[in-house]
Amino acid sequence: MSRSFNFCSGPAALPEAVLKKAQAELLNWHGAGVSVMEMSHRSSEFTSILESAKARLTRLLDIPDNYEILFVQGGASTLFAQIPANFVTDHKTVCYLDTGAWSAKAIKEAKKYADVIVSGSTKEQNYTTVPSWEELNLDPNAAYLHITPNETIGGLEFDDLPETDLPIIADLSSTILSRSIDVSKYGMIYAGAQKNVGPAGVVICIVRKDLLERSDNEALPSTWSFANLAKNNSMINTPPTFAIYLADLVFEWLEALGGVEAIEKVNEQKAARLYKAIDGSKLYSNPIDVAYRSRMNVPFVLADESLEQTFLAESEAAGLRTLAGHRSVGGMRASIYNAMPVEGVEALIEFMRDFESRYG
Ligand code: PMP
């Protein structure tokens, strides 16, 4: 059976070469006589995988020495609570930008630990654009500013960072490794793996070392403390070993392709072609401010809503999987992360044109 082009927002498509390598190594990893899933996380074999993943990620994102890479469990949603729990200490407030559904969820959790200042929000514009950086309400004494540079549900992405001395904490779950970033501008980056990095089960965190001091706090649950995770090389307890191994293989694949700069060019092309097809049609439309359209998640609606189910059934039958929008917003959404080949996007555009010619 041939594989589909998978447009799922997450868990998302993985590079086929990575799946094949994992398959070849599954029963007997590098002569260890067992699979990665079956070996002690303290073994020299697994430690070498963890160190390899850290080294590759450091090279891919050019991570400076004053940052620590952590592999955290519980999904990005747990980080929504864990971040304020770790960093608030004597700071009373935290600042958040509200640019979509994921920002809103992060804000809701942060309120359980701190006084949240919503520094800017585009809720009233249905999250179709970003707030003006000049008008942000930033408390200079806040513990940090939290942002969500790619809103996976709304399909909104921004690249430029607000001017502030506050440490910026960014949820890059759906955009990490898809475009170049300057890590030194962030206090912390975190990303659930299941979009651009690997399978679900691990969150990649990159934390500036001076911020870790704030979380060296005995009152925190020990598995929640970033400082404690750093001290224990992300192995306070059993880490999600297989997810970390797959992440290492994805990093290896990305390095072989030429790294983040190389995949960024491909991602630009894929997104440009798809938005062009949407804008050039009478049937499809995308509501997001053109300057902030996501390169990773492309939502679109059909002018005639009653055609949605037919679109989904026919696209699925054509081998284009999971094009339904998030259950909270409906419509369609094509997630086109790093592992989506150009051919997948071309096949989708071809299908959309053909569908429009028959029903439009
Ligand atoms: N933040 C963003 C931007 C996301 O897209 C998601 C998941 N789609 C999450 C957080 C939550 O991730 P998890 O399911 O790993 O908790």
Image (cartoon, rainbow, N blue to C red):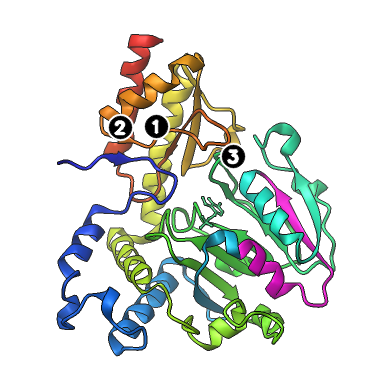
Q: Amino acid at mark 2?
A: Glu
Position of 346 with respect to 149 (left or right) is left
Location of mark 3 (residue)? 292
Q: Is residue 93 magenta?
A: yes
Name the residue rendered at 49%, 53% in the picture: 175
Reading the image, the residue beneath label 2 is 346
Quick one: quadrant of the N terminus?
A: top left
Q: Is tag 2's residue or tag 3's residue first in the polypeptide sequence?
A: 3
How would you rate the neighbour count of disc 2 (Cα within 10 Å): few for under 14, some for 14-19, many for 20 or more? some
Q: Which residue is mark 1?
A: 273
Q: What residue span does the magenta drawing correspond to?
A: 79-99
Q: Is residue 96 above or below residue 278?
A: below
Q: Secondary structure at mark 3?
A: helix
Disc nearest the viewer among 2 and 1? 2
Real-space Cα separation, disc 2 to disc 3, in angstroms = 22 Å
The reply to whether dot 2 and dot 1 touch (C-beta < 8 Å) is yes
The quarter in which the C terminus is drawn is top left
Quadrant in the rendering for residue 54 = bottom left
Residue 249: % across, % down? 30, 66
Which residue is depicted at the point 36% across and 54% down? 262
- Position of 28 compared to 145: left or right? left
